[in-house]
């Protein structure tokens, strides 16, 4: 029964990083919808609705092997949480749900699904980040080489909570609870991001560069930056007396994100020129952070209304579309060749 053994092996090695497919497709879907509204293109808007439905299916296709691993191979899951890199990938489960919540609020406007996925996603990223940081604090074997951009996934989830849940502030019975979760998540995510960013820069400057297979993770830093901009714009709309403060910090994050965007392009080109980069599931890490930064920039520019930023938005959107299509093609190619288990090893 080689097929059964192969399936069991795939489940045993299944990586939560596959939720990055939902994350990347989700931000691409939201970006398509916002671009369609911006240019009053009904066809583009209808395409975003189709993508939202497809992404919903993607989530449950990935959820099945994820749950099977949790139930059947619990020892392997415990082993993942002992690994300073692998444990962070589990955060993608919560971020994927927040991304779906954004699809249901911005694209399809299905409020019951929106509320379920937002609360499930928000509570998941909060609990997972507390658990991951607790385990990190208790470890004594973490070395500087273990530090990688994947550590930013937790702060990405926390910073995304207000931006993806802004619509829920219109429901008076839960408004106070939602605002509390906003403030708690954004405050924790903001200071954790600053701390981890300093450690990451220290590691990248004073230690050897990332392995070629992990270079897509370098783009992850745009995830928390884009999430922060999105949430700061949300605060702009729901807390009027913080308008000037929120836009000032949004401006800072926008500048940092733009700098990181061009730096990520340069470093990726350098790696592609210097060494062979084989496809991994981590390639979806190109899509979500870039898409989240794009969404944050589009929302930010609604207030700023800068023509140059508009040009940048169009440029990023084209790159995001190319990256998404490339990831879909390579994922399907590896699926047909039966190499998905190989692709998920990082």
Image: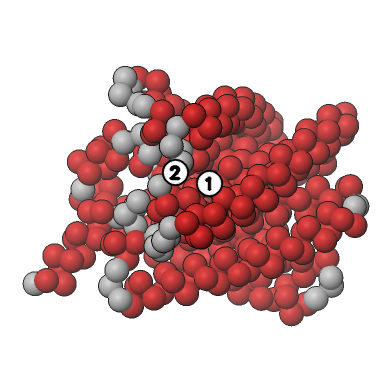
Q: Is residue 87 visible?
A: yes
Disc 2 marks which residue? 210
Q: Can residue 60 be seen in this view?
A: no
Outermost residue on the left side: it is: 1
Give coordinates of residue 77: x percent, y percent.
27, 42
Which residue sits at x=74%, y=63%?
315
- Few, some or many residues within 10 Å of mark 1 (<14, 14–19, 20+): many
169, 278: nearer the viewer: 278
43, 194: nearer the viewer: 194
N-term-proximal mark, 2 vs 1: 2
The number of numbered discs placed on residues in the rendered structure image is 2
Reply above or below: 88 against 310: above
Which residue sits at x=42%, y=69%?
331
112, 106: nearer the viewer: 106
From the image, state whether disc 2 or disc 1 is nearer to you.
2
Give coordinates of residue 115: x percent, y percent.
60, 49
| Quadrant holding the N terminus | bottom left
Which residue sits at x=62%, y=37%?
159
**Circle 1 — which element?**
helix
- Few, some or many residues within 10 Å of mark 2 (<14, 14–19, 20+): some
Disc 1 marks which residue? 218
Reply above or below: 187 against 74: above
Q: In which quarter of the image is residue 230?
A: top right
Determine contact: label 2, label 1, CB under 8 Å: yes
Give coordinates of residue 269: x percent, y percent.
56, 58
Is 30 displayed left or right of 143 in the figure?
A: right
Is 206 displayed left or right of 311 in the figure?
A: left
The span from disc 2 to disc 1 (Cα, nearest Å) is 8 Å
Which residue sits at x=47%, y=74%?
329
**Circle 2 — which element?**
loop
Give coordinates of residue 178: x percent, y percent.
65, 36
């Amino acid at each position: 029964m080689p097929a059964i053994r192969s399936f069991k092996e795939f489940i045993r090695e299944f990586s939560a990083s596959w939720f990055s497919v939902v994350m990347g497709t989700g931000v691409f879907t939201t970006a398509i919808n916002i671009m369609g509204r911006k240019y009053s293109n009904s066809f583009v808007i209808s395409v975003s609705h189709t993508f939202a439905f497809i992404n919903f299916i993607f989530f449950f296709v990935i959820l099945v092997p994820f749950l099977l691993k949790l139930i059947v191979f619990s020892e392997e899951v415990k082993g993942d949480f002992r690994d300073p890199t692998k444990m962070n990938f589990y955060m993608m489960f919560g971020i994927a749900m927040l991304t779906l919540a954004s699809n249901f609020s911005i694209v399809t406007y299905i409020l019951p699904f929106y509320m379920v996925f937002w609360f499930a996603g928000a509570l998941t990223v909060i609990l997972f980040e507390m658990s991951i940081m607790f385990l990190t604090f208790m470890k004594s074997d973490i070395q500087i080489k273990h530090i990688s951009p994947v550590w930013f996934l937790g702060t990405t989830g926390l910073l995304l909570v207000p931006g993806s849940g802004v619509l829920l502030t219109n429901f008076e019975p839960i408004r106070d609870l939602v605002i509390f979760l906003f403030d708690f998540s954004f405050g924790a995510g903001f200071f954790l991001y600053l701390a981890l960013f300093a450690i990451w820069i220290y590691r990248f400057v004073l230690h050897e560069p990332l392995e070629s297979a992990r270079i897509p993770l370098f783009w992850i830093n745009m995830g928390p930056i884009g999430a922060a901009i999105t949430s700061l714009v949300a605060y702009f709309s729901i807390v009027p007396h913080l308008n000037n403060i929120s836009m000032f910090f949004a401006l800072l994050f926008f500048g940092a994100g733009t700098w990181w965007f061009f730096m990520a392009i340069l470093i990726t080109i350098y790696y592609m020129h210097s060494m062979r980069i084989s496809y991994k599931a981590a390639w979806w890490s190109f899509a979500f952070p870039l898409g989240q930064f794009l969404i944050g920039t589009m929302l930010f520019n609604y207030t700023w209304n800068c023509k140059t930023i508009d040009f940048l938005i169009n440029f990023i959107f084209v790159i995001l579309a190319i990256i998404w299509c490339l990831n879909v093609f390579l994922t399907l190619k590896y699926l047909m060749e039966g190499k998905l288990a190989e692709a998920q090893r990082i």
